[in-house]
Image (cartoon, grey):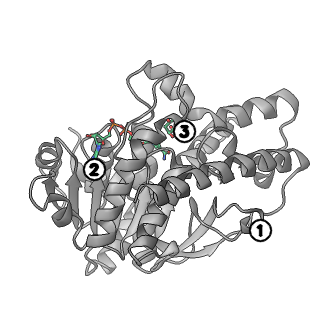
Amino acid sequence: MFAARQATSAIFGAAQRRAFSASAANASKVAVLGAAGGIGQPLSLLLKLNPRVTELALYDIKGAPGVAADVAHINTKSTVKGYDPTGDGIKDCLKGAEIVLIPAGVPRKPGMTRDDLFNTNASIVRDLAKAAAESCPDANLLIIANPVNSTVPITAEVFKSKGVYNPKKLFGVTTLDVVRASRFISQLKSTDPASESITVVGGHSGATIVPLLSQAGYALEGQELADYVKRVQFGGDEVVQAKGGAGSATLSMAMAGARFAESLLKAAQGEKGVVEPTFVDSPLYKDQGVTYFASNVTLGPQGVEEIHPVGKVTEYEQGLLDVCLKDLKGNIEKGEKWAKENP
Ligand SMILES: NC(=O)c1ccc[n+]([C@@H]2O[C@H](COP(=O)([O-])OP(=O)(O)OC[C@H]3O[C@@H](n4cnc5c(N)ncnc54)[C@H](O)[C@@H]3O)[C@@H](O)[C@H]2O)c1
Ligand SMILES: O=C(O)C[C@H](O)C(=O)O
């Protein structure tokens, strides 16, 4: 039988559980908006298994109370409550949240780009961002809904318009790109994926996803390198195709979102040297008009502590970066413009 304790032990090791006990006084409310969806459900499950989470608040336009009732039976200590749009649902869900994950929004079907989701997801994210800016302006906001390259700038504009924008607490979740980059190189080189750490920078769509394989000491060449880069850049499409119209990555994304939330909680609870890749308001390419950029970031109790530079790249990687920056600038400006015109 899959006992919750065993599952918790498998995902969160003994050292983590001891560290958690030492800081058990921390109350960590985590909210998931879009909790009844393909990502939302397994993400809620993984958060329920995380001993650092003390309160789990699950919101969706439909189905969240059911998901909450189900997840709440898992024998870990956190409390779970589901909320829907009736009454003060969203406000109550967000009040006191330390972390808010937003996977609410439509996923791709074969033949679509992430940007094709813009028209639907922009207003969903804007409205949820408004609610967060009003009810939990100090929370860490983790944007999963696509197109991340635009939904993060939209969220920032909402927070700016309410006078509560804190660039250190707004994150586009790009964790899945490094999870894939590590897994795919381990398949090529027959290594342990858990010990692979491939830096991926840029954004979260196609050519804006730039894996920097050379920094991990790998020197793939020619077609092998091109195929690897393409697989990382279009890993999402691989899943969209395989699901044949039934959506995009949900399970691997839930794992990636839960990992990022865990890293933020560790940092908030005093752990040093917690580094994750994420798409943030970044100085790295501001001189080229690219105001948000994903790179490795050291997390601290106040969110972003240090944005790591991109570091040394090969000529080939510089070529990828040049293409990335051009696309990214357009995606960011599109989000900002839309948010200003559609407050
Ligand atoms: N950042 C990443 O790496 C990454 C990875 C995978 C998917 N995604 C994106 O995540 C999003 C969700 O994907 P999914 O597979 O879970 O989709 P899904 O359709 O299965 O679930 C989305 C959920 O959002 C809910 N929702 C819609 N509007 C809402 C609103 N206004 N308030 C609250 N909830 C609302 C829906 O009811 C649904 O339950 C998509 O945009 C997808 O492209 C991002
Ligand atoms: O590919 C998608 O549309 C979903 C997500 O962004 C992913 O990378 O899997």
Residue 115 shows which numbered tag?
3
| Marks 2,3: beta carbons within 8 A | no
Give the residue number, with chain letter if any, for mark 1. Answer: 287
The three-letter amino acid code for the residue at tag 1 is: Asp
Mark 3 lies on a secondary structure that is helix
Alpha carbon separation for disc pair 2 and 1: 39 Å
Compared across the picture, whether 218 is left or right of 127 comes to: right
Labels 2 and 1: the sequence-earlier one: 2
Mark 2 lies on a secondary structure that is helix
Ligand 1's image quarter is: top left
Mark 3 residue's CB less than 8 Å from ligand 2: no
Alpha carbon separation for disc pair 2 and 3: 26 Å
Closest to the camera, between mark 2 and mark 1, is: 1
Alpha carbon separation for disc pair 1 and 3: 25 Å
Residue at the (73%, 52%) spot, across then down: 325
The three-letter amino acid code for the residue at tag 3 is: Asp
Give the residue number, with chain letter if any, for mark 2. Answer: 44
Q: Position of residue 242 (x, y in %)?
A: 48, 20
Which quadrant of the view contains residue 309? bottom right
Query: Crowding at label 2, few (<14), some or many (≥20) Cα neighbours within 10 Å?
Result: many
Residue at the (68%, 69%) spot, across then down: 308
Q: Position of residue 189 (x, y in %)?
A: 72, 36
Labels 2 and 3: the sequence-earlier one: 2
Q: Position of residue 71 (x, y in %)?
A: 18, 48
Which quadrant of the view contains residue 105? top left
Please state, as top left, top right, bottom left or bottom right, where the C terminus lies in the image.
bottom left
Query: Crowding at label 1, few (<14), some or many (≥20) Cα neighbours within 10 Å?
Result: few
Mark 1 lies on a secondary structure that is helix
Q: Does residue 290 lie above or below 121 as drawn?
A: below
Q: Position of residue 172 (x, y in %)?
A: 51, 57
| Marks 2,1: beta carbons within 8 A | no
The three-letter amino acid code for the residue at tag 2 is: Ser
